[in-house]
């Protein structure tokens, strides 16, 4: 029997409360038992470099805010123990990073963003239209989309700017209001792996089996299990 993949899951901000994700995980298939997930909602005062090293994959599913009741940035130099540079070092040494929905909502040059984190994930947030019916479609023949079908859900349709030249796109999304955009890709950073998924704002998306399997596929990829 193989060891479970250890996942650090950072979430909860004013615009992306933890309740949506907590309820979503309750409907995940039995496969979720293959992962040991440690949920953190106040990363600023919990994370240290040695703490990061305990995990196979870090998932960032919130914006640059301490938690839902405190919108001050959790990447604060001179205060936070862990900065984007520490996360980059963790990945370069062989760790995995999944940037999930709000984890891709960092704008270039913004006080609510982090250019260093953007450089690591490889994308910058541009905008999203009001939540709308969004179609998500697999792209190419990546193992990450093996067995994944196209699906449509009401969601925040993220429009991102892809900044890295090494991205391997495996998912796209489209809506009447937002047009077509990239919604899933991977890249290598040093000895580690990075994956990005932009869907995931409301509960119905989290309850979609295709989306659930996409998340777990990304964890497997980032942990080098595929």
Image: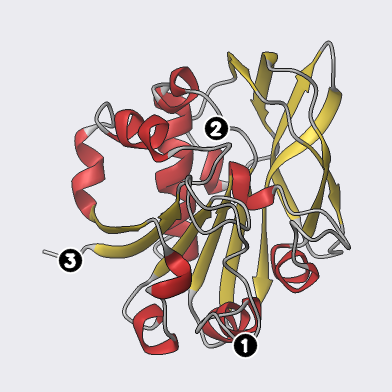
Q: Residue lying furthest left in this view?
A: 1
The earlier-in-sequence mark between 3 and 1 is 3
176, 46: nearer the viewer: 46
Q: Gap in Å between the C-alphas at discs 2 and 3?
A: 29 Å
| Dots 2, 3 in contact, CB < 8 A | no
**Local SS, label 1:** loop
Is 93 placed above or below 18 here? below
Residue identifier under label 3: 2
Position of residue 215 measured from the top left corner of the image (x, y, whole percent): 46, 43
Q: Gap in Å between the C-alphas at discs 3 and 1?
A: 40 Å
The earlier-in-sequence mark between 2 and 3 is 3
| Dots 3, 1 in contact, CB < 8 A | no
Is 54 placed above or below 154 here? below
Residue 112 seen from this side:
yes
Residue identifier under label 2: 200
| Dots 1, 2 in contact, CB < 8 A | no
Q: Gap in Å between the C-alphas at discs 1 and 2?
A: 32 Å
**How many numbered circles does the render carry?**
3
Residue identifier under label 1: 78
């Amino acid at each position: 029997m193989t060891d479970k993949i250890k996942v650090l899951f950072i979430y909860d901000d004013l615009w992306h409360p933890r309740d949506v994700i907590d309820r979503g995980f309750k409907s995940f298939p039995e496969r979720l038992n293959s992962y040991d997930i440690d949920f953190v909602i106040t990363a600023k005062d919990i994370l240290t470099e040695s703490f990061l090293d305990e995990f196979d994959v870090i998932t960032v599913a919130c914006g640059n805010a301490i938690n839902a009741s405190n919108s001050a940035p959790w990447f604060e130099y001179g205060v936070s123990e862990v900065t984007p540079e520490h996360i980059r070092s963790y990945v370069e040494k062989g760790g995995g990073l999944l940037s999930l929905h709000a984890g891709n909502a960092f704008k270039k040059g913004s006080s609510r963003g982090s250019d260093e984190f953007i450089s690591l994930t490889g994308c910058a947030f541009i905008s999203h239209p009001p939540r709308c019916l969004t179609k998500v479609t697999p792209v190419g023949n990546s193992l990450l989309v093996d067995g994944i079908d196209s699906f449509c859900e009401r969601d925040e349709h993220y429009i991102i700017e892809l900044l890295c030249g090494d991205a391997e796109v495996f998912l796209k999304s489209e809506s009447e209001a937002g047009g077509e955009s990239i919604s899933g890709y991977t890249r290598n950073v040093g000895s580690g792996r990075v994956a990005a998924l932009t869907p995931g704002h409301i509960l119905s998306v989290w309850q979609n089996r295709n989306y659930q399997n996409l998340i777990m596929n990304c964890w497997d990829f980032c942990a080098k299990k595929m």
